[in-house]
Amino acid sequence: MSIPKVSQSDILQAFDVITPKQLERQQRRQAERDDRLKLLAEFQTLWQEHLSHLVELPSDQQIFTWFKIAKYDWALLSATIENLRARSKHPFDPSDPYSHAMGYYSSCLIRRMRAKYGPPPARKAA
């Protein structure tokens, strides 16, 4: 009776062993997630300081959508909050001020992005 030879792939399949490359990737993703959550907290704090008396805080999902639009550029995000605060001197739509403020913030952020990075690349016709 002979003993079967155990290969490295057999060991990896038998036990959930994390390779150094996988561990590095997990650590990098966790660090990115922590950075994004820290940025979210900073954004919420800035929003509360400047706009809490006018408009309630948007959902985390909405804020992360703005982060993606701004490519996580804190200068653009904070400047747009300041712009919305300055805009609040003029009344928002009385029927739905929250929606009006969210739309204004989004459009202002997109305008600032285009001014900083230029228009998006043209798509090819289908």
Image (cartoon, helix red, strand yellow):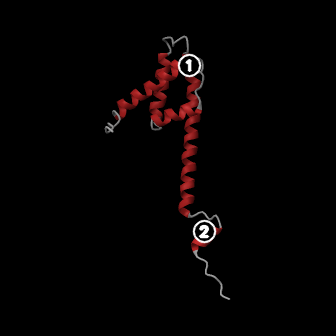
* Residue 96, horizontal then vertical, whole percent: 55, 15
The quarter of the image holding the N terminus is: bottom right
Identify which amino acid the numbered label 1 is placed on.
Tyr
Pointer 1 and pointer 2: residues touching (CB < 8 Å)?
Answer: no
Q: CA distance from mark 1 to mark 2?
A: 53 Å
Per the image, label 2 sits on a secondary structure element best described as: helix
Quarter assignment of residue 20: bottom right
Residue at 55 percent of width and 22 percent of height:
50
Closer to the chain start, of discs 1 and 2, is 2
Which residue is disc 2 drawn over? 12
Residue at 44 percent of width and 25 percent of height:
107
Look at the picture and state if 35 lies above or below 23. above
Look at the picture and state if 83 lies above or below 64. above
Other residues around mark 1 within 10 Å, as few (<14) / some (14–19) / many (≥20): some
* Residue 91, horizontal then vertical, whole percent: 51, 11
Q: Give residue 10's mark.
A: none
Look at the picture and state if 89 lies above or below 110. above
Extreme-right residue of the structure: 1
Residue at 65 percent of width and 87 percent of height:
2
Per the image, label 1 sits on a secondary structure element best described as: helix
Extreme-bottom residue of the structure: 1
- On screen, residue 42 versus residue 87, left or right, reads right
Which residue is disc 1 drawn over? 98
Residue at 44 percent of width and 31 percent of height:
76
Other residues around mark 2 within 10 Å, as few (<14) / some (14–19) / many (≥20): few
* Residue 4, horizontal then vertical, whole percent: 63, 82
Q: Nearer the viewer, mark 1 or mark 2?
A: 2
Identify which amino acid the numbered label 2 is placed on.
Leu
The quarter of the image holding the C terminus is: top left
- On screen, residue 54 versus residue 105, left or right, reads right
